[in-house]
Image (cartoon, grey):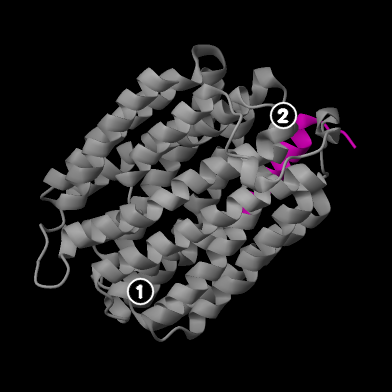
């Protein structure tokens, strides 16, 4: 059944809005819970984040391929959102970083199942000349949910502990309970509001997964190579949260920092996607990556709390440009019948690199064994350098 672009794209945006309200109230604050309440070192936090993101991306490639094969994008997305909605409330009972790691793992399995089929469904529901706008609109709604979730988190934290520098267990547990509500609403909205869209070209036989790394447009390979290099320096945003705390930003106001970032993201995403329809995806991604390199250099050199406020706002501009436009570029350079698999491969390339990226960041910050590390600035110097290198690869390879 074919539906109008606006219906699926908007409803999927609402689903992401609700899911992000839930996720931002819990997962974004999770590094503070790990560090302040459970006493986990940054190397362990980097390990948890790296394993979680890599897990998600390994699942994404299979889920994307499966959505091409069975032509059921919605059902896979529904399973993925459901797994996440049921796993996050378990954080209420977490008493060790190992338990948190397991719950984070389960949540990322859910993300891995849903992401590639959902992105392929957005692409299938959009005309080529409006694809950038569709992804930009989806990212804007997704980020709007992040803003609402973070605003609620900031309010709960402030009312619970005022201007305390560190997060308290009871306040985090309260956040987990509240966040469960929009998580379950996201699943219901997807179940009753979205209709599968299966292009006619999906009637062919889909090749086995083990051969799917072959036969792509060379521009897709070039883009994946650039993304891998970029992601190697793009450690988990958990390190941005911890960096803000080293600049003496209180726990409640760290959440406000994230709100500033996400408001900027939401304001930029839709016009950036529309601009990419006219101006070209590659050019905008290059601009975003160079901006990222400058922001990470700023985080490395930051010395005062107000530096964090400015840098988080600019970081939101990078996200607003890069996220939706990158996904639209994938849809431009692959055939419709392979989009699910392409998004899976794209997310897998990101996720496989996310593990060493976060682990490297944690080690550079804290060190390992007898080596004490280079301190909080080191991961950001490294990330800035990798972003510049990735920009060169993107410029020359696609």
Give how far across and how far down residue 166 sits, in percent.
Answer: 26, 73
Q: Secondary structure at mark 2?
A: helix
Q: Which residue is mark 2?
A: 336
Q: Is residue 339 magenta?
A: no
Residue located 75% across and 42% down the image: 68
Residue located 39% across and 40% down the image: 228
Q: Secondary structure at mark 1?
A: helix
Q: Which residue is mark 1?
A: 33
Residue 393's place in the image compared with 305, above or below, is above
In the image as oriented, which residue stretches furthest toward the top? 278
- Residue 330 placement, left or right of 238: right
Magenta stretch in the rendered image: 1-19
Residue located 30% across and 60% down the image: 359
Which quarter of the figure has residue 319?
top left
Give how far across and how far down residue 270 sits, in percent.
Answer: 54, 30
Residue 195's place in the image compared with 328, above or below, is below
Q: Earlier in the sequence, mark 2 or mark 1?
A: 1
- Residue 389 placement, left or right of 342: left
Q: Could you say which is closer to the camera, residue 336 or residue 33? A: 336
Main SS of residues in magenta: helix
């Amino acid at each position: 059944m074919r539906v109008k672009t606006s219906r699926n794209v908007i409803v999927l945006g609402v689903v992401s809005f609700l899911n992000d309200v839930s996720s931002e109230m819990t997962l974004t604050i999770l590094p503070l819970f790990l560090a302040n309440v459970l006493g986990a070192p940054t190397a362990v936090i980097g390990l948890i984040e790296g394993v979680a993101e890599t897990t998600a991306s390994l699942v994404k490639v299979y889920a994307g391929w499966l959505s091409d094969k069975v032509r059921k994008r919605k059902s896979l997305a529904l399973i993925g959102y459901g797994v996440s909605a049921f796993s996050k409330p378990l954080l209420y009972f977490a008493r060790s970083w190992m338990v948190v790691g397991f719950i984070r793992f389960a949540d990322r399995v859910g993300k891995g199942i849903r992401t590639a089929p959902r992105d392929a469904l957005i692409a299938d529901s959009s005309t080529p000349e409006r694809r950038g706008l569709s992804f930009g609109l989806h990212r804007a709604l997704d980020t709007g949910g992040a803003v609402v979730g973070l605003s609620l988190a900031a309010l709960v934290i402030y009312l619970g502990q005022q201007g305390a520098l560190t997060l308290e267990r009871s306040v985090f547990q309260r956040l987990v309970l509240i966040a469960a509500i929009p998580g379950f609403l996201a699943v219901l909205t997807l179940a009753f509001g979205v209709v599968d869209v299966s292009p006619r070209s999906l009637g062919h036989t889909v090749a086995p997964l083990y051969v799917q790394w072959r036969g792509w447009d060379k521009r897709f390979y070039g883009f994946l190579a650039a993304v891998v290099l970029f992601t190697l320096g793009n450690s988990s945003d958990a390190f941005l949260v911890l960096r803000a705390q080293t600049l003496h930003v209180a726990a409640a106001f760290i959440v406000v920092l994230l709100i500033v970032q996400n408001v900027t993201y939401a304001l930029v995403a839709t016009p950036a996607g529309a601009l990419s329809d006219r101006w070209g995806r590659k050019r905008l991604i290059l601009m975003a990556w160079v901006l990222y390199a400058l922001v990470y250099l700023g985080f490395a050199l930051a010395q005062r709390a107000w530096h964090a406020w400015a840098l988080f706002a600019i970081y939101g501009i990078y996200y607003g440009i890069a996220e939706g436009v990158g996904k639209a570029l994938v849809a431009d350079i692959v055939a419709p019948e392979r989009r699910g698999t392409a998004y899976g491969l794209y997310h897998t390339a990101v996720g496989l690199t996310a593990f060493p990226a976060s682990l490297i960041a944690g080690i550079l910050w804290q060190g390992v064994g007898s080596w004490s590390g280079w301190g909080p600035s080191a991961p950001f110097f490294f990330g800035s350098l990798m972003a510049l290198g990735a920009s060169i690869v993107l410029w020359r390879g696609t």
